[in-house]
Image (cartoon, rainbow, N blue to C red):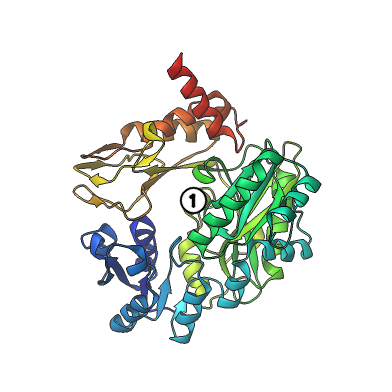
Amino acid sequence: MIRRMLVANRGEIAVRVARACRELGIEVVAVYSTADREARHVAVADTAVCVGSAAPKDSYLNIPNLIEAARQTGADAVHPGYGFLSEDPDFAEVCAAEGLTFVGPPPGVMAELGDKAAVKALMAKAGLPLLPGTDTPVDTVEDGERVAAGIGYPVIIKAAAGGGGRGMTVVADSREFRSAYLATRTAAHAVFRDSAVYLERFLVGARHVEIQVLCDQHGHAVHLGERDCSVQRRHQKLVEEAPSTRLDDRLRAEMGQAAVRGVRSIGYTGVGTMEFLVGEDGRYYFLELNARIQVEHPVTEAVTGIDLVVEQIRVAAGEPLRLAQDDVRFAGAAIECRINAEDPDRSFAPAPGVLDRWEPPAGPWIRVDAGYRTGDRVPPHYDSLLAKVIAWGPERPVALARMDRALAELDVHGEGIRTTAGFHRAVLNHPAFRAGEHTIHFVDEFLNEEKGDGQS
């Protein structure tokens, strides 16, 4: 078993991983930037090492500094969390070369998964359905225009190396294509250092549904049901829930089996998420595979009772899965809201500052995963996520009522600080969402409604 874990991340996910390590009897090594010296994830660790200045490239993305921190502290494993280096095959390879257990898939598998277009081709071979589009990058705008005309508008242009909801542009018709193509390539190069893009049909009226999978190093794999992540803004997830109101038992089982078939076909190990679009007709299409723990993993934990981070660490240590597919049971409904330090009244602009008061909600059936405390400074250098609020109920209306109560209890104040809690309450009480009839277009439609009300 792993003895000492270096957590190569910050914020709530670093705290979450530290908690799982504690339960497994593993010592925790935190890393921090100069901006995070007093951060909560540092306080919960056994040992902490400064790995650089505030800029991520100098600290949380600085592989030599992270490896040196592992050497200094005698860590024998590294957990990357999500974001930062969590899906970087070079980091996984360096960890392996240094004798460090990397909590994630092998470097070779991760390298394969880095190219979204190549992954689609692999999943097609495994028999998973795909949207019409390209399985190799589109190199010129002229080629893109021809492909788009062939598959039909609307289309979506995606960065081949993209992830986390970034590097995607929806194009409604041919007049918009050239500028959208060039802008997406430029953005992809700036963010991912790879300008390659591919195209696929954009499915109107779809739901974004993902399947959680868990695979060991001995050929065993299970799925842990779905999460519906259709409430998104600019392809960034805001609200996640399980189960999805669009899936019935037959479709749920079919998508779960497809997800397991897909990960087995590439020798995947660890926790992973197979993402799909589900149309109004119930047909589903593979989108991508995320090779890491997801922000929204507590939703699955709430309805299955399975600690995903603990299982992820056990699998990385070489242990076989402790459950078969028939052992997975689902109970009730769960929903998660991401509370960000953002101002919805200013187009969700980041709103960093000092948390003069931080009182998270509590009470029955409420879970809060947070990376901050009263008095902490929310720095401008990183993701704006303050906390995740998760509510469970025996059925969806109860979970929604508990979430609304929890968001009303959340008490956050500080100079410059604004949060998205009020926005979430409005979304959760919208008739379309409460009826479970929302789609991936819901937030845009909701914001247009709000804008229209404000102008009337």
Residue 412 in the image: above or below residue 323: above
Where residue 129 sits, quadrant-wise, is bottom right
Residue 255 seen: no
Work out whether residue 292 or residue 344 is closer to the camera in this orientation and state it: 344
Q: Is residue 354 left or right of residue 302?
A: left
The residue closer to the viewer here, 234 or 95, is: 234
Q: Residue at x 70, y 59 (%)?
A: 138
Instruction: Give the image location of residue 43, x and y in percent.
Output: 23, 62
Which residue bears the numbered disc 1? 296
Residue 125 seen in the figure: yes
Is residue 96 left or right of 182 when viewed as pictured?
A: left
Q: Which residue is nearer to you in this view: 124 or 100?
A: 124
The image shows residue 456 at horizontal and vertical percentages of 46, 13
Q: Nearer the viewer, residue 50 or 128?
A: 50
Q: Quadrant of residue 105?
A: bottom right
Amino acid type, label 1:
Glu
Determine the residue positioned at 39% across, 58% down.
13
Which secondary structure, mark 1?
Answer: loop
